[in-house]
Amino acid sequence: MNTSRYAAFPQVPLDDRTWPAATVTAAPRWLSTDLRDGNQALAAPMSPERKLVMFDLLVAMGYKEIEVGFPAASRDDHDFVRMIIEQDRIPDDVRVSVLVQARDELIERTVESLRGAPRATVHLYNATSPQFRRMVFGMTRDECKDMAVHGTQVMMKYAERLLGTCDLGFQYSPEHFADTEPDFALEVCEAVMDVWRPGPDRPIILNFPTTVERSTPNVFADRIEWLNRNLSRREHVCLSVHPHNDRGTGVATAELALLAGAERIEGCLFGNGERAGNVCLVTLGLNLYTQGIDPGIDFSDLDHVRRTVEHCNGIPVHPRHPYGGDLVYTAFSGSHQDAIKKGFDAVEREAARTGADPSRMPWRMPYLPLDPQDVGRTYEAIVRISSQSGKGGLAYLMSARYGLNLPRALQIEFARHVQALADAEGGEIAPDRIRDAFLREYAVTPAVTPAGPLPETAGTVTALHIDGEGFGLGPRRTDTVRAVRSALAERGFRVRVVHHLGPAGREREEVAVYAQCGLDGRTFWGAGIERDVVSAALAAVDAAVARAGLRRPAAPAALPPLPERERRHAGRSGHPAGRPRRVIAGR
Ligand SMILES: CC(=O)SCCNC(=O)CCNC(=O)[C@H](O)C(C)(C)COP(=O)(O)OP(=O)(O)OC[C@H]1O[C@@H](n2cnc3c(N)ncnc32)[C@H](O)[C@@H]1OP(=O)(O)O
Ligand SMILES: CC(C)C(=O)C(=O)O
Ligand SMILES: [Mg+2]
């Protein structure tokens, strides 16, 4: 590749920059340009209907400055502006703006589109960079400056003629500011201000776009700090930035610009816009939120925002898009899942200890920069199981989704089963399949249960785990059922441990008990899930004993036929192939 065709971007001479030591403590003013810069970048620009959906979304989210179009561009753009004005759809605390080039014929139509608006801003621009002056305009610096000055004069003339009592705002952008000599950008802005004459009730927005992002964000920040120091009438100027994302650093550019003195940011939801997009307003807003700063924008139903934006733009949001993508609150890898599970366990313990509401506790969760619930997501998709997962993730899924808190040793054992499944199938294993595999493997129901005690030699049920708590049963107890009953009674087990088994909303409340059965130096786990703890404990013991194969009949053929469900499960359990699962536990 021919690197020699490109050159590093020149630095701004600013040796005493202060922005690196600054911090952001409040949200900037936001302007959404989804309906203008975002819209102009679509293969099929939005119809007025889709524009209205986007406009209503932006208003509902709390954006107070919305660029609604380029009325001189098309009938749709013009008619949309007319529609929201005539139908009185602009809330009192929202200001719309419209963009226009510094060209007389376009300015008239643009200003005219705002007739009847109680308040609105005209946004005028012309390119100022040397390339543009040379290649596109064929103009000197002075001629280029005159273009901006003249455009401002023409805009004011038409506004006076057409807009009557409108509370008119004015914004000027030197397009390609990031490529323009800083002193020339300043000169043009000063000349524009001389015409507009900003004052106490007559502010001006000076908006500095990267237009095409070519430099590292620190270079842009230096430019903004330099302007911040050198602009006259600074108290009447709102210093705004408009980063694009050509180098993938639009967000960083905006954030460093804030440190350098910018007060307002223009961007689009999920970073729509020309080429690699405008800066993403969702990322910027939630970046502030996760620093404890209120962005002033409602992101509490981010999936709805994303769906609406996808509908309006006709472009899908990437699954890994910060904060809003489908996968950004999901861990697939084992060590991440394990740490997240431990993080949630720690929060629960802390909440139980202090009586605090977990949803109000400080968020410090490994691998999750934001509580998904804060943006309307659930915890369900936090962990998804694949061949990269381990016992921690599995334990989280079983607990969070099905209320099954597996003891650690059982987690380890079950993880091996799931790993084998993942290795065999590849890809993701759906939660319900994992739960089914667990029930099939551990909640074994003996097919025949005649009365009578277990023989002394049958093996020893060594432990019960009820809702994550282990109860050792002592070495000498061999009568399983008696051991269970007395262990529960000795502990005065009256607590009703309630789990929801199955998807949230199912009404059955059940208790899960896990039993460990030791035989010949090996351990066999069983699970019982029943409506009360004693039945669950008995079922768990039955299952553990059954899995140990303790009371296998000598001749399986002598038993009645297997029920359909049992038949399906036989041979899929990790037991040697063909070994009968039909075992009997006495009661
Ligand atoms: C960075 C940005 O996003 S800026 C916003 C850009 N947005 C858009 O362009 C979308 C809307 N635009 C349009 O619909 C059309 O371009 C229109 C209606 C504005 C103009 O259409 P046309 O008159 O056919 O001209 P065209 O689009 O080809 O523009 C080229 C002319 O604009 C001039 N021009 C380009 N940028 C500017 C500017 N910022 N200020 C003044 N004139 C400009 C060019 O020099 C050229 O002039 P020429 O006709 O003398 O050669
Ligand atoms: C019109 C201006 C602000 C623009 O969109 C840009 O330069 O990117
Ligand atoms: Mg732009």
Image (tube, helix red, strand yellow):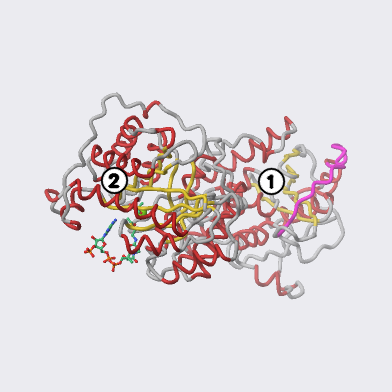
Q: Tell me, yes or no, whether the highlighted magenta stretch contains residue 73.
A: no
Q: Tell me, yes or no, whether the highlighted magenta stretch contains residue 501.
A: yes
Would the CB of label 2 be found within 8 Å of ligand 2? Answer: yes
Q: In the image, what residue type sits under mark 2? A: Phe
User: Which quarter holds ligand 1?
Assistant: bottom left
Q: Which mark is residue 97?
A: none
Q: Quadrant of the N terminus?
A: bottom left
SS at badge 2 = helix
The reply to whether discs 2 and 1 touch (Cβ–Cβ < 8 Å) is no
Q: Looking at this view, is 260 or 290 the one in front? A: 260
Q: Quadrant of the C terminus?
A: bottom right
Residue 248 position in % (x across, y down): 34, 49
Q: CA distance from mark 2 to mark 1?
A: 76 Å
Q: In the image, what residue type sits under mark 1? A: Gly
Magenta residue span: 488-502
Q: Looking at this view, is 545 or 244 the one in front? A: 244
The residue beneath circle 1 is: 518
Q: Which mark is residue 177?
A: 2
